[in-house]
Image (cartoon, rainbow, N blue to C red):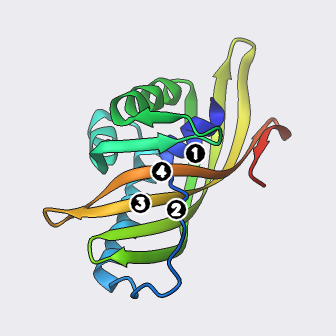
Amino acid sequence: MLSKIAVALMCAAIAAPLVAAADPVPDTAQKALTADYALVCTASQDPTDANLTAAYGLLAPSFVHISFKGEQMQRDAFIAQGKQQLKQLHITSCANTITSMTLSDPTTIVAVVAGKVGGQIQAPDGNHDIDVSASSSDTWKLTNGTWLQTQSKDVSVLVKVDGKVVQDEGN
């Protein structure tokens, strides 16, 4: 469950093969995606309705999240799960770093993103420190002048609660 919030907050993720001979990603597209990942962090740290609406607005209507187990979750279920999980979290730090970008055609970019989230999680026995490091492979499509995320696939996740590893996949 905690891995999915990391993925939701980071708009996390698609694992698609990278094309070796792909064209370079235009600077405007790089800047747009960097701003989109920053918006996800803003919404994670300040989950107002306006911020969440803006962040979830980055997901295409056909968006699908693919878990480590290959399970697929459609956009509406992904958003509902993210909103529910945010009710238990108080995120105090968030950073997303694009580690690679590949332009597979003029309207499609695959971005591999490393994200780190820190804060507290509410549990029945009180609040606990949480630290999540995750990476995803995200596919973005240019639609009517806007980059929308169409797919996200988990690549790795490391979740620590009170310093203890509770989930480690893909590392």
- Toward the top, the furthest residue is 124
Calculate the distance from the C-alpha at mark 4 to the C-alpha at mark 2: 9 Å
Residue drawn at point x = 54 percent, y = 61 percent: 96
Calculate the distance from the C-alpha at mark 3 to the C-alpha at mark 1: 27 Å
Residue 6 falls left or right of residue 27: right
- Give the mark nearer the N terminus: 3 vs 2: 2
Amino acid type at mark 3: Thr
Calculate the distance from the C-alpha at mark 3 to the C-alpha at mark 2: 8 Å
Measured along the vertical axis of the image, is residue 139 above or below residue 4?
Answer: below
Q: What residue did someone put label 2 on? A: 16
Q: What residue did someone put label 1 on? A: 92
Q: What residue did someone put label 4 on? A: 152
- Give the mark nearer the N terminus: 3 vs 1: 1
Q: What residue did someone put label 3 on? A: 139
Mark 2 and mark 3 in contact (Cβ < 8 Å)? yes
Q: Dot 2 surroundings within 10 Å: few (below 14), some, or many (20 or more)? A: some
Calculate the distance from the C-alpha at mark 2 to the C-alpha at mark 1: 31 Å
Question: Where is residue 27, by image quadrant?
Answer: bottom left
The kind of secondary structure element at disc 1 is strand
Percent across and percent down for residue 107 are: 27, 71
